[in-house]
Image: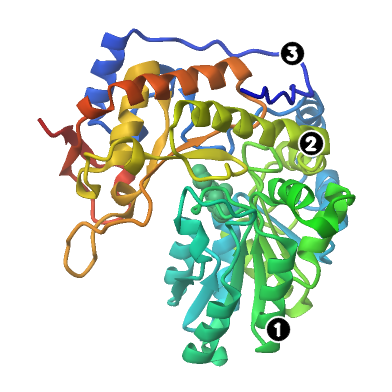
Amino acid sequence: MKRIYYPEPFRIKSVEPLRILTREEREEKIKAAGYNVFSLAAKDVYIDLLTDSGTGAMSSSQWAGVMVGDESYAGADCYYKVQENAKRIFGLPYIQLVHQGRAAEKVLLPVLLAGKKYAIANMHFDTTRAHVELAGSRAIDCTIPEALDTTAYHPFKGNMDIARLEEHIKELGAENIGVIIMTITNNSAGGQPVSVANIRAARDVAHKYGIKFMIDAARYAENAYFVKQREEEFRSSSIAEIVKAMFEGVDCFTMSAKKDAIVNMGGLIGCRDKEIFELVKQRCISFEGFITYGGMSGRDIEALARGLEEGIDENYLRYRIGQMQYLAARLDEAGIAYQTPVGGHAVFVDAKKLLPHIPYYEFPAQALAIELYREAGIRACDIGSYMLGNDPDTGKQLEADFEFTRLAIPRRVYTQSHLDVIADALINIKERACSVKGYQIVEEPPILRHFTAKLKPIE
Ligand code: F0G
């Protein structure tokens, strides 16, 4: 195997001990958790790949920032710093702090969707979809068909299907569409990047029909790194220049800073239009707090201001994406299928291919997540039929396009040895795959069931 070697551009100054339970203890814990990984205590997990959100390791500079964060109610120093950095990086004139990504959606989306029936996106993340629906509108996904084939190579599988986008606009009526959203990277399709050409094309279609164009910027820096690797025009551009190109002419953005700004809590809204920004500020004061802190403590704002810079450092991004590529290469060697090419924040293992004997209604991706915990104390999660849930009208289990077990890698947290443990665990499971059983739900709430449902293995 060609060794992928993008070593950590940092050394470790502070460590957090991990406990490794025995296999028998893990069996007991997962059973007691009702075979739901969200019900496991974190201390019983060895490698936690549940999410890359808010789970990153801050730098010594960010921790130093925590100590100097200004806790003033209004006009704190860290507020001006985050404003300055965000305006410079994204190039939008108005920036509002909020406490996380979904708070940005809650504040901004009802402004864009007032009196409108639809939002169209390359793919809505769950919380974005929820906030579109809470605003009384419907969320339509418009992903390119290549994204659905996990084995096919496409450099920008996160792209919007531009032809279909325009068809949707014509069918639904431009006046009924409040916003066109580009999620970068496209999380639900596998952390897949979107090209700058595709962002520009979607933006131009939106503007041709007088519709606002918004970016969901959670993983904008990882997206920019892929653009540099794969889009000819940007081969010799800096990451900062690519980010500028991605946000050029964009009307608004929402951002969960818990991802690429490498903080444990935080979010941003960006606007180009002063009128929209005035409404955002008013809503922020009601829902999040006064505009200069937006639901955040000063120390967290200071860490965010510094994290925005660290997140676009090319050496860091090379190591970061290199971790995914290393893990993916080990899976290639073992013939384990995943969404290819590997994305920016996670490896999305194709559980349908690894456990072909388990039908969608017995939740293969959930079964694999449970098996990873049993095998090595690894916590991953299902992005498949188990998460999708039941048809709200008929109550019947829906079949998802994908059955992914997502291995989300926290930023700057795990070493290459941890990645080897993950690969080895999957290889061991593959060897005994036909003995892995499906699951049935024994208790479930009506919505977002995957967080709290209880399951049992089908004997
Ligand atoms: N948009 C995208 C693309 C996301 O991936 C997330 C969160 C959000 C918005 C919401 O941000 O959590 O700060 O409120 N994704 C996490 C995940 C939870 O695990 O993928 P938030």
Q: Tell me if label 1 and label 2 are in contact, CB under 8 Å.
A: no
Front residue (pair 257, 347): 347
Kindly identify which residue carries mark 2: 69
Distance Cα–Cα, label 3 vs label 2:
21 Å
Tell me the residue at 46%/10% (across/down).
19
Residue 93 rendering spot, x and y as whole percentages: 84, 66
Which picture quadrant has residue 274? bottom right
Q: Amino acid at mark 3?
A: Lys
Label 1, on which residue?
A: 207
Q: Is residue 124 visible?
A: no
Residue 158, by quadrant, is bottom right
Q: Earlier in the sequence, mark 3 or mark 2?
A: 3
| Few, some or many residues within 10 Å of mark 2 (<14, 14–19, 20+) | many
Q: Amino acid at mark 2?
A: Gly
Q: Is residue 19 left or right of residue 301?
A: left
- Mark 1 or mark 3: whose residue is earlier in sequence: 3
Identify residue type, mark 1: His
Identity of the residue drawn at 82% across and 44% down: 78
Quadrant of the rendering where the N terminus is positioned: top right
Residue 403's place in the image compared with 400, above or below, is above
Measure the C-alpha gap from mark 1 to mark 2.
40 Å
| Element class at badge 3 | loop
Q: Is residue 153 visible?
A: yes
- x 32%, y 54%: residue: 388
